[in-house]
Amino acid sequence: VKPWLPVPVEHILRAVSVQQGDENSVLEHYRRFIAFRKQYPAFAKGEIEFEDPQDDALIFTREFGNETLLCIFNMGPAETNVTLPAGEWQALTGHGFTSNNYGDKIDIPAWGAYFARLA
């Protein structure tokens, strides 16, 4: 349908038809993350327990059944370094975020995230 008001070019460039299939688009990022989230029931149904904050990092676990997931979000504009809680954590993939993992430390880029499962 032709809109009755003019559509700014900035909005047209963000249309679904433009973003669809572009792996770097916001649309595809959300689709990837929603598919990732659906793989782990603990994200939606799990009990939540917050860990002590570290710098700009929001850290919590979600537990459902025999699965415990770790979620770390860098809420700041700069990379942050986080020490993992005690336990053997296996990094999860397929969510679209990047991080550098070395031992019990994680470097998370600005506005990034890290997800892991307790082994």
Image (spheres, helix red, strand yellow):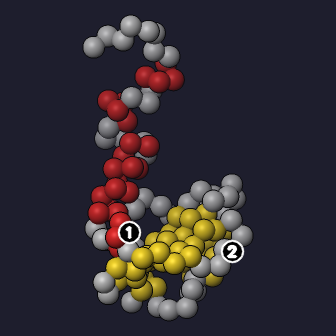
Question: Real-space Cα distance between discs 1 and 2?
Answer: 22 Å
Task: Return the x and y of residue 29 as percentages of the image width and height.
Answer: 40, 50
Q: Disc 2 residue type?
A: Gln
Residue that numbered label 1 is attached to: 43
Q: How dense is the environment of label 2, judged by Cα within 10 Å: few (below 14), some, or many (20 and up)?
A: some
Instruction: Please say if 16 is above or below 43.
Output: above
The quadrant where residue 92 appears: bottom left
The quadrant where residue 77 appears: bottom right
Numbered mark located on residue 66 in the image: none
Q: Is mark 1 on a helix, strand or loop?
A: helix
Q: Is residue 17 left or right of residue 10?
A: left
Task: Return the x and y of residue 17 as percentages of the image width and height.
Answer: 32, 29
Q: Is mark 2 on a helix, strand or loop?
A: loop
Residue sitting at x 68%, y 74%: 54
- Residue extending furthest toward the bottom: 87
Residue sitting at x 64%, y 68%: 57
Question: Which quadrant is home to the C terminus?
Answer: bottom left
Dot 1 or dot 2: first in sequence order is: 1
Query: Residue 67 versus residue 11: which sits nearer the camera?
Result: 67
Question: Which quadrant is home to the N terminus?
Answer: top left
Residue sitting at x 59%, y 79%: 51
Numbered mark located on residue 54 in the image: 2
Decide if residue 52 is in sight here.
yes
Decide if residue 91 is in sight here.
no
